[in-house]
């Protein structure tokens, strides 16, 4: 069995939060975990809902960085995490 793979799901709240998520992804990568995160894997022009669905289905795990903003977007079906 190979290294585990994870998709990191989070809300893009501000630059500090995005930087923290990137640092987490870098740490996981350095520990041998395959990581899918928008900052590395989503390209300009890609469809976000398709990226998220594919990332959830092709990785072993989904790591959710569940902040109050993430929860609000999810509950209100608004942006990224809130897509139906």
Image: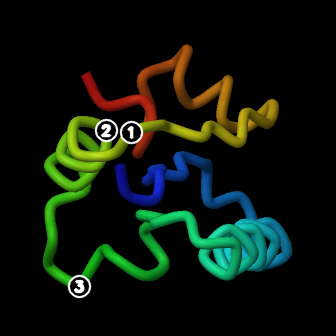
Disc 1 element: loop
In the figure, residue 72 lies in which quadrant?
top right
Q: Earlier in the sequence, mark 3 or mark 2?
A: 3
Give the Cα distance between marks 3 and 1: 25 Å
Q: Which mark is residue 81?
A: none
Which is nearer the eye, 7 or 75? 7
Residue position marked by numbered label 2 in the rendering: 56
Residue carrying label 3: 44
Q: Quadrant of residue 84?
A: top left
Can you give x and y, in whole percent of width and height, for residue 41 in the image? 33, 76
- Mark in the foreground, 1 or 2: 1
Q: Are marks 3 and 1 in contact (CB under 8 Å)?
A: no
Q: Residue furthest top?
A: 75
Q: Which residue is mark 1?
A: 60
The residue at 43%/82% (across/down) is 40
**Mark 3 secondary-structure assignment:** loop
Compared with 40, 11 (above or below) is above
| Dots 1, 2 in contact, CB < 8 A | no
x then y, percent, for residue 37: 47, 65
Image position of 24 (left or right of 10): right
- Residue 50, how many percent across, how many down? 14, 49
Taking the image as shown, residue 10 lies to the left or right of residue 47, namely right
* Residue under the image location 22 percent in, 36 percent down: 57
Residue 76, placed above or below residue 44 = above
User: How far apart in space, not on screen, are marks 3 and 2 (Cα)?
Assistant: 20 Å
């Amino acid at each position: 069995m190979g290294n585990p793979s994870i998709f990191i799901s989070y809300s893009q709240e501000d630059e500090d939060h995005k930087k923290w998520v990137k640092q987490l992804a870098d740490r996981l990568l350095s520990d041998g975990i395959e990581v899918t995160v928008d900052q590395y894997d989503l390209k300009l022009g890609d469809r976000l809902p398709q990226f998220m669905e594919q990332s959830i289905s092709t990785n072993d795990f989904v790591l959710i960085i569940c902040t109050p903003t993430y929860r609000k977007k999810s509950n209100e079906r608004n942006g990224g995490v809130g897509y139906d």
